[in-house]
Image: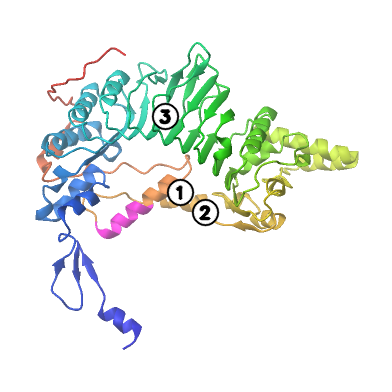
Amino acid sequence: MGLSDHLYHDRIQTNMGRRRVDGDQNKDRLSDLPECIILHILSFLRTPHAVQTCVLSTRWKHLWKRIPTLNLNSFQFRTLKIFSVFMSKVLSLRDPSTALHTFNISRRGDIEPRLLKKFLNYVYFHNIHLQELVISLHGDIGLIFSCVSSCRALTSLKLSVGPTWRDPKKTLFPKSLNLPLLTSLDLEDFAFCGDESGCAEPFLEFTKLNSLVIRSCKVIDAQILNISSETLVNLDMQNNSSLFAKIKLYAPSLCAFNYAGSHHIHNIRGCGLSSIKQVNIESVHFSASQEDALVLFSWLLDFANIESLTVTSTALQILSLVPDLFEVKLRSLHKLKSLKIDLIRIYEGSLLVLMKEAMLKKAAAKSPKEGAKLRKAFETCFEPPAIPDGMVDFLRQNSPSAEVNLTTKYPSSFNLKQIGESIKGVKINNYRSRFSMRSSSSLPRLSVRSSSSSVASAAAAKSASDAAPASAAEPASAASPNLDPCLGEKDVKSSNKDDEEKHQHNTNAPLQDNGQ
């Protein structure tokens, strides 16, 4: 009997957790798992999907009530009304004796104050064992921080609390937030207040902080953001305001640093940069200046011991604006093992103008004829190279054996073969077409009662939508699920009938609006 015959003979047929092996009788292998393992598996699902999954088996019918996580995302529902009805049922029917370890509430835009208070009250009464809290919405920051400060067991906190339409100012992050066990902090759209010394120090009380993410934040009444932590290992800064000029860093344990800037590159000084092993610089802004170039150059000097460097081609183009850059002998990058460059094309902006001026100046220094020839080339749509000539060799001057990889989401915008031939030992990989992403992003999302094939399609759609550029059209929101036994058909039809009807629930709220 050949291998193919053995595989055919021993094939496994799966259908809703049932397998048939070598002709044995059907056996529900998944349901044979201990309940604690099934609960652990279900805890990775969003709450509506977890409730749906429990419909598959009578044994699982009430399991969703004992899942230690609540993952509530209003994006899955067509209206806030349906979301409100569903979540009210979930909170009221959930087993009150089950410890709550993770709570995630996400809502694009404003949320009804009564509904927000209902969520926060539930967290308040179940916060003894709560370790992970995610709140992403626009709402009353006073109520939210009153709830957060009561969760003393938190180890992970992610907050994206945008202002309401009545108050468009950025949300102020409190100067004092006592969370003694916190190891991971992720903040978006916050403002940090400075002190009399002109420095903001919002993270001083988090003595066990391991990971810090700051996105779209700003500093007010100060020019310096101070990040001081003995335990910090990962620092991620993305698209923060240019209103503060400098970041003062004291993080002797820092290993990974990610920086994404769309309009500005911050000057970073202090202790911690020499301990970093992995650096990712995602500068994609096109309104660069020589000041930005000098800041990037200072980073290279301070990143003395990095082993992995990931940069965008625009960051290298900005760096090339440093006068006489290639004459500099670097005293860093001796341990560099990997250099990854993400190619991004620039069409306009001051960066393009400055690069052309620098190239013309260099060509004119050789001879007026060379300068005139290059100027004429620019007039006929010639563009500066995506990776400035000699830049890779400059970065590898102390580590010539470092591996170089090129990636891009826009392969049709570059002559990849020509770029590859200009860099010794380069590898071009992991690029994909924008057009294929846009077409796949229109795939349907997970339906209410989906087959295994539609689940795969939904997964593909999510992956494609995550990767697609902002200009790609978003798929339509998924229909609200019929979550029997949590919700009956009557409940769903009733909630769909009048989307504008105000949903009312009486709440005994220990949290009071403090007027902040």
Verify whether residue 452 appears in magenta. yes
Q: Secondary structure at mark 2?
A: loop
Kindly identify the residue that appears in the image at 26 percent across and 75 percent down. Answer: 11
Q: Nearer the viewer, residue 376 or 485?
A: 485
Mark 3 highlights which residue?
A: 188
Kindly identify the residue that appears in the image at 12 percent across and 23 percent down. Answer: 506
Residue 287, position as x, y percentages in the image: 63, 30
Verify whether residue 28 appears in magenta. no
Residue 114 position (above or below residue 131): above
Q: Residues within 10 Å of mark 3 (few under 14, many from 20)?
A: many
In the drawing, what numbered circle is on residue 360? none
Q: Residues within 10 Å of mark 1 (few under 14, many from 20)?
A: some
The quadrant of the rendering that contains the C terminus is: top left
Q: Nearer the viewer, residue 221 or 306?
A: 306
The picture quadrant where one finds residue 176 is: top left
- Closer mark to the observer between disc 3 and disc 1: 3
Kindly identify the residue that appears in the image at 18 percent across and 24 percent down. Answer: 502
Residue 21 position (above or below residue 196): below
Q: Secondary structure at mark 3?
A: strand
Mark 1 highlights which residue?
A: 438
Q: Residues within 10 Å of mark 2 (few under 14, many from 20)?
A: some
Mark 2 highlights which residue?
A: 432
Q: Which region of the structure is painted magenta?
A: 451-460
First in sequence: mark 3 vs mark 1: 3
Q: Secondary structure at mark 1?
A: helix
Q: Which amino acid type is shown beneath numbered disc 2?
A: Arg
The quadrant of the rendering that contains the N terminus is: bottom left
Whether residue 307 sits left or right of residue 324 in the image: it is left
